[in-house]
Image (cartoon, rainbow, N blue to C red):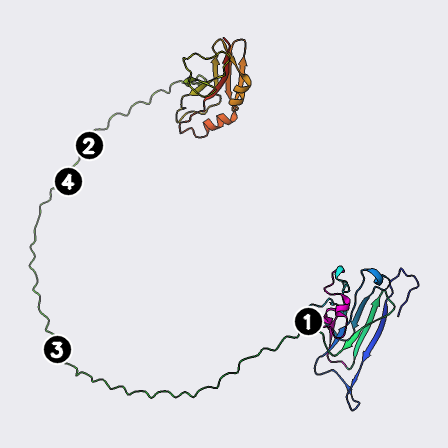
Amino acid sequence: MAIYNDNSDTIPTEVGIDLEFFDDKGQKISLTKDEALIGLASLNNDTTMNGANAQRSAIEQVRVNNGEIVEITGSSVKKHGNLAYSDTDNHFKSAGSKFEQDDWDTGTSSSRYYGAAVAKFKNVDKISLTSISYKRPTVWLAINSEIAVPKVPTAPRYKESKSHKTFTPEKLKEVPTPKLEELKKFVPEKEKTVPTPKVKLMLVKVNGVPTPIYKPKEKEPTAPVVPTVHVHDYKLSTRPQIAKAVENSDKMNINGQYVAKNSLNRFALQTEVLPANRTTYTKLVFNDHLPSGFKLDVEKTKEANKGYEVVYNEKTNFLSFTAKKEILDAVNKNRAKEYQLEALSVWGRPSE
């Protein structure tokens, strides 16, 4: 036993227990043939420092010195090497326990298995245990040959098998022997002689292959003089045709009609279909000299043509669209097929 004066130190208390068994003639019983099971019960853990138990909280353990610990299904007491104890509080439901301590820690409770374990011994002449208590200078351990379990299973009841009836097989009926037909003697027919057919020989005269007549070998032509080639570097450009339509803000065609001054209108510049098998386009520019008296809405025009760089000279009323990379990539993606560009939108208002 070890006791410390300082209350802040843990107080381990250990008590060794040796059990020997004798028969009615005083002869010592050795556990050598069959395994012996001993119940270890009432192992408490109230370390939550809860209420009145705060001054006497403890962990009750038992060490099996010459045997083996077996856990009970559903018990809070677990095997820790050769020690058996609960490593969680099993006193209070508020601390996580399945039961309150008063509900299981009695000798008659059906829930007493919750604080119990089993010690198994074989080939020993005595049972050696050590009862241990931490945080309290007292020990408590219930040892019993009765082992607490959650519920003893009911032995299955089997139906009694019915007595076998004597089976007498029916006598087989005699099968009449079939009458065999008398075998007939087989006489093969005499082989008939097949006359040999007469063959006529037809001779055909074959004309010989005529001797070919070869043309005299012509004089080989003189190799031409290799010409001198002059290459002029040039750049090819093309100008697709553009159709111009005029619409008002309601998308109605107003081409050739009178419109209200300062009303919002749209020029739709539609390029003809680009031909199939075209060369790679490296630059695509559309220029338009706007009519006098037409005031361009620059921001709305840029918003409507996001795939182009839009440049406008207000003094000359000159508008230019230069295709960005995404437009050129779309034009050049499949040059074997025709390609239709979306119409350009020029938004503005007549000021005269």
Q: Which residue is mark 2?
A: 214
Three-letter residue code for mark 2:
Tyr
Q: Which residue is mark 3?
A: 187
Q: CA distance from mark 3 to mark 2?
A: 77 Å
Three-letter residue code for mark 1:
Pro
Left or right side of 237 for 66: right
Vertical position of residue 269 compared to residue 134: above or below: above
Q: CA distance from mark 2 to mark 4?
A: 15 Å
Residue 316 in the image: state x and y as whole percent: 52, 9
Identity of the residue drawn at 7% across and 60% down:
197
For marks 3 and 1, the one nearer the N-term is: 1
For marks 2 and 4, the one nearer the N-term is: 4
Q: CA distance from mark 2 to mark 1?
A: 119 Å
Q: Which residue is mark 1?
A: 150
Mark 4 or mark 3, whichever is nearer to me: 3
Query: The N terminus appears in which quarter of the rendering?
Result: bottom right
Q: Who is closer to the viewer here, 116 or 181? A: 116
Residue 329 in the image: state x and y as whole percent: 49, 28
Three-letter residue code for mark 3:
Val
Find numbered disc 4 in the image and state the secondary structure of the residue it sits on.
loop
Find numbered disc 1 in the image and state the secondary structure of the residue it sits on.
loop
Q: Which residue is mark 4?
A: 209
Marks 3,2: beta carbons within 8 A: no
View extreme (right): residue: 5
Marks 4,3: beta carbons within 8 A: no
Highlighted range, magenta: 95-124
- How packed is label 3: few (under 14 Cα within 10 Å), some, or many (20 or more)? few
Vertical position of residue 94 compared to residue 23: above or below: above
For marks 1 and 4, the one nearer the N-term is: 1
